Image: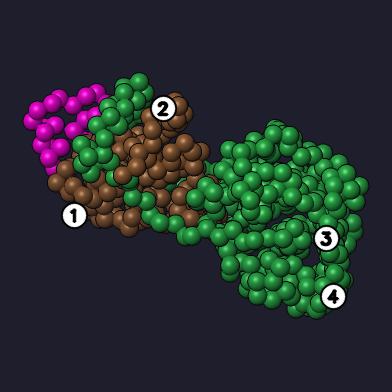
Chain colours: A brown, B green
Amino acid sequence: MDWPDVGSGMAGFEAFFRDHYAAVVRLAQTVVGDSHGAHDVAQEVFLAAYRRFPGDYEQAAGWVRVAAVHTALNVIRGDRRRDQRQLRVHAVGSPPSPEETVIEREARAEVRRVLRRLPRRTAAVLVMRHGGMSYVEIADALGVKVSHVGTLLRRAESALRKEMDRETRS
Amino acid sequence: MRHVPDGVLRRLDDEPLAVPDRATDHAAACARCSARRVQIADDTERAAQLLSVPRLVPDLDLAWASFQRELDRGPEERGDRGRPARVIPRRRPRFPSLSLRAALIIGAIGVVVAGTAAAATLTTIFAPTRVAPVTLDQRDLQAIGNLIGLGDNRALGGFSAPAGSTALRFGTLKWTSPAAQPPSTLAQASAAAGFPVPLPSHLPAGVGAVQQFSVQPRVSATLTFDAAAGSLDGSSLTLDAGPAVLAQYGGTNGTDMPTLAVVTMPRPTGISTGASLAQIEAFVLGQPGIPPALAEEVRLLGDLKTTLPVPVPSGASVRSVQVAGRPGVLLADSSGAASAVVWEDGHGMLHVVAGILDTHDVLNVAGQLG
């Protein structure tokens, strides 16, 4: 496996990292829900970007955002027991912080279950938009026309409502 | 006007400036569209609530230190943590090889399809002061070619003869499209075109020197509508593009493969008689075979009197940039190997810089031309 030399290029990558880390963490957090998981996803994404775009980080700005969404979706789809385990740990061991109550965690667990059930592209467009990406960025990420993003988003939000209603009833 | 599609109503809440005024006005005045907009806004608000997370302000110093530690551990120690995140594959980008003349034609076609030229009545000049991307896939190009009588894929090849006419379903298209001239020096190219041609003084490594200049004389096309066009019968639309100067740079590795192209030309103009902008746009975009997505994208361009659609190959990435303070469109293929930027300089000139270069280098070259 080839890794770029750690030298003058590292300064450029550090600047890129600092410019985009917060946006990547936010996207990941929108999916996985907790800050630790979001940081793990972000670290993994930036390590991959460092290897994939040696010395040319202009191209990587969009890529790290898209990679964050899909990596985070992989995380929640690959660990179905995570939500229940987290709820148990929090309920028994640690007191909820002021901004994060047990009820909120339960609600986010519901959202993650729904995101797992939705088609990947539907889940991705929801997370991209509500995680802060513009229509142009989403169009670029999905390989569709900008004018099509509103339609995809509308369908995705409608699908999210229906799935949430189903989740609540069950 | 037809009812506003759901996707446009959705965008109205996020990016209202990207939605044409008439769609906004219709949505406000139409009870049916207003009701749908409320329902869409409800779903949007609910999605926003469900997907909202506590605002996380990461400690960048800590994150960077953690990243460096992970990097020092190397891929083997990290196990599967070092594998690249998987991204849904995108359609393979296509960058059609365009001659200068074909590029001019494409620009003119974009103008026709956009229903640009023409506003008000009698004679109105289309004079774009900004550029905006319009994504074209193979189906779109075929539809455009069929619409203006060029046939399959001929939209990329331009007109087959230096002058002529062809009968369309709704009128007649006449054109003049003289062959390009190959002057040998910048001074000759500038004199033939009739305007100064700026070139970059500092070039990216590997670009090499100018290999050749080329001047494309003005290309003109007049579309005269007949009775089949209904209320447009008797109206005409004339589009002029060029002259344009192409400076083509060659590689330094002993090959003659072009590495950089710099195109300079006056902004294209359009003159209409009779029909209004709204009439022509509605008619052209409503023609059979025009893909609805293309029509919607053109409608989203905004003020067509002052906007030049820049054709973007499907799959290419595109974003808005500033070149010397002026808005431009930056295109790149997904590999980063080729990119191009198009902008109007505020003095009536349109510039294109394209090359086998990354976007940073292309913007550097563009910035030198102002």
**Mark 3 — on which chain does it sit?**
B
Nearer the observer: mark 4 or 2; the answer is 2
Q: Secondary structure at mark 2?
A: loop
Q: Are marks 3 and 2 in contact (CB under 8 Å)?
A: no
Residue type (three-letter) at the residue carrying disc 3? Ala
Choose the circle earlier in sequence order: 3 or 4. 4
Residue type (three-letter) at the residue carrying disc 4? Ser
Per the model, the C-alpha gap separating discs 1 and 2 is 56 Å
A99 in magenta: yes
Residue type (three-letter) at the residue carrying disc 2? Gly
Q: Nearer the viewer, residue B119 or B336?
A: B336
The lab-note entry on whether marks 4 and 1 share a chain reads: no
The lab-note entry on whether marks 4 and 2 share a chain reads: no
Within 10 Å of disc 3 (Cα), the crowding (few <14, some 14-19, many 20+) is some
User: Start and end of the magenta stretch?
Assistant: A84-104
The lab-note entry on whether marks 1 and 2 share a chain reads: yes
**In this rendering, is residue B182 above or below B71?**
below
Residue B362 visible somewhere in the drawing: yes
Q: Are marks 4 and 1 in contact (CB under 8 Å)?
A: no
Nearer the observer: mark 1 or 2; the answer is 2
- Residue A80 in percent (x, y) is at 17, 49
Instruction: Give the residue pinned by disc 1.
Output: A170
- Residue B370 in percent (x, y) is at 74, 35
The residue located at (74%, 50%) in the rendering is B211
**Mark 1 — on which chain does it sit?**
A
Instruction: Give the residue pinned by disc 3.
Output: B180
The residue located at (47%, 36%) in the rendering is A55
The quarter of the picture where residue B214 lies is bottom right
Per the model, the C-alpha gap separating discs 3 and 4 is 20 Å
